[in-house]
Amino acid sequence: MRDKFLLAYRSIKERRTRSILTVLGIAVGIAAIVSLMSVGYGMEEAITGELTGMADMISVMPGKIAGHAYVELGSFTDRDVKDVQRISGIKDITAMTYDAVEVEYRNERAPIFILGGDTKELGSFYVDPVGIKEGRWLRENDYKGCVIGDRVANDFFDEVIHVNDKLEINGAKFVVVGVFEKASTMYAADVDPHIFLTLRASQEVLQTDEVKYIMVRIYDIEEAEEIAEEIEEAINDNHGLDDFANAMTMGSMIEQIGDVFNIIRGVLVGIAAIALVVASIGIMNTMLMSVMERTHEIGVMKAIGAKSSDVLSLFLLESGMVSLVGGVVGCVVGVIVAKVISFGASAALGIEMTAVVKPEVLLGGMAVAMVVGVLSGFYPARKASRMSPVEAVRYE
Amino acid sequence: MIHTENLTKIYRMGDAEVYALRDVNLEIKEGEFIAIIGSSGSGKSTLLNMIGCLDTPTSGSVFIDNVNTASLNENELAEIRREKMGFIFQQFNLVHTLNAVENVALPMFFAGVKRETRLKRAEELLVNVGLGDRIYHKPSELSGGQQQRVAIARALSNDPEIVIGDEPTGNVDTDTGNAIMDILEGLNKEGRTIIVVTHDAEIAAHAGRTKRMRDGRVLD
Ligand SMILES: Nc1ncnc2c1ncn2[C@@H]1O[C@H](COP(=O)(O)OP(=O)(O)O)[C@@H](O)[C@H]1O
Ligand SMILES: [Mg+2]
């Protein structure tokens, strides 16, 4: 057996350029699979990881999700907030207002959304993950202070807004006490285009005691779905509607994201499969060329007594070895590419993301390389083994 | 040891039929050194390929040790080629990726001989044909005469009873040709049956018996 390896190795080495090309063909296919899968897993882990940090949260909105769009049906009232507070299993609850207002800065006006709520709670949602670039976060008694997102500070007005600059919100004067950092993709939509106020200040500005959004933190994640249902019932009762409140647990969001990732992975695997088909055509082609080139050699081997099965196993061994090397190279390159892509994506999208290289992906990649290599080597190998010795020896 | 009965080989080229062999009845005795001469295209190679179990006849049969080769399957034919016969070709037909000693050891490899035994014997065989100092050379690094001697060593690798040469001197100069024939004569003296095809009467003179072919027939 060792001798067969040596023989196969010789003929691979002898045709170095072509062997390298074949190895590359397989390696590209395997690298595609490994890197796409690893990046996919990495992305999934990055996003679900961020979400699981918030697994004890239920967000309650006055509206429903129709298809993929959110339709707002109205607002919550103080009574809704109080009723939700009474449900058992809830650790704490934050009511938030959210609406468009008119903001004036140095004689320039723009419509901007404000977000008001309990400063401690809002802070724990946004300040830790995003960070404050200038100034500080709101305090409970900052009735005339506000903190602004990155786009509010830099994009919405001709002049950049800094700490201590003054804004007029719906005619009321506010001082900017802090400016957020530019947020990562996960938080960009929540933070960058918004002005943050205390709940009291925002209700004053909006001249309402209505609430647009309730954040609930619970004690036991296991109870999340139950509590979410109780919340919906309580609020729906208040409003005499069936489908008014929408309480979403992070768990259900994670599940939804998981579904999305299954689809993404399916697509990635499809792409990789195409790459592999191309690679296997490449192997078959090079192995066929190898057979044609060596018609003579095969004939000689048969003339001096090689059985068809000897020739078959030699050629299969050859394509097997090429595929093995291709598989290993593919796995290594795939892992490197996955790391580079994740690094680039982290930098570009602002997500904390590392490629997740699962051993089963590597093993699968190797297995696919071997199967593809040996299968596509089989036809040429059989063709070689069936060659008649005279025909081959005559062929000069 | 070998005889043919009405051995016929027809090649079809489109509509035309080429009779490469017509009703050849030939007997070769054990330990004989026979030369078959004839002009190019007379069917010499075709006859050797039949005797050497490389090709199958259109009709008629080849008997080796009274076994009709037509009754053997592919693996049994391969075994005959491997164990009973040694082939020497006009174009040497060495495997160019392997060096001299590996080429010589190749038939033993297919016979399942252990690596150490195989390489040792291959080296001895190369020494015997005067190539003891060239055992690690690739065919491309050897002259025609040297390549043919490697091919002879390879033919002897599994210690065959029969050595078959298809114009073994066709691609070498006269002196080398005579040296090769001397080696074959030596092998004959060891008791091996030697069958050589040539179109050169001088070369044929080394043989104990000469048969002439013309148009696919063996003349008396
Ligand atoms: N594979 C083949 N296909 C067609 N014709 C062939 C083939 N092999 C040999 N022949 C023909 O058979 C005849 C005998 O050929 P061959 O045995 O090679 O002659 P020799 O070896 O005496 O020169 C020639 O006419 C040759 O053209
Ligand atoms: Mg000939």
Image: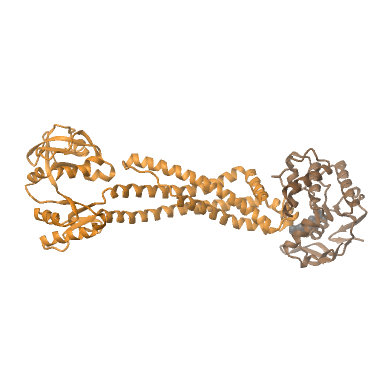
The answer to which quarter of the image holds residue B145 is top right
Q: Which chain is orange?
A: A
Q: Would you say A388 lies left or right of B37 here? A: left
**Which one is in front, B199 or B138?**
B138
The number of callouts visible is 0
Residue A336 location in percent, x, y? 45, 42
Residue B33 can be seen, yes or no: yes
Residue A342 location in percent, x, y? 38, 43
Q: Would you say A109 lies left or right of B215 here? A: left
Residue B183 location in percent, x, y? 87, 46
Q: Would you say B180 lies left or right of A318 here? A: right
Q: In the image, is residue A90 above or below residue B3?
A: above
Q: Would you say A228 lies left or right of A377 here? A: left
Residue A240 location in percent, x, y? 11, 63
Q: Residue at 56% of width from left, 49% of height from top?
A: A324
Q: In the image, is residue A194 above or below residue B83?
A: above
**Which one is in front, A178 or B22?**
A178
Q: Residue at 10% of width from left, 60% of height from top?
A: A238
Q: Quadrant of ligand 1?
A: bottom right
Task: State the colouring used for the structure image.
Answer: by chain
Residue B12 can be seen, yes or no: no
Q: Which chain is brown?
A: B
Q: Residue at 59% of width from left, 49% of height from top?
A: A321
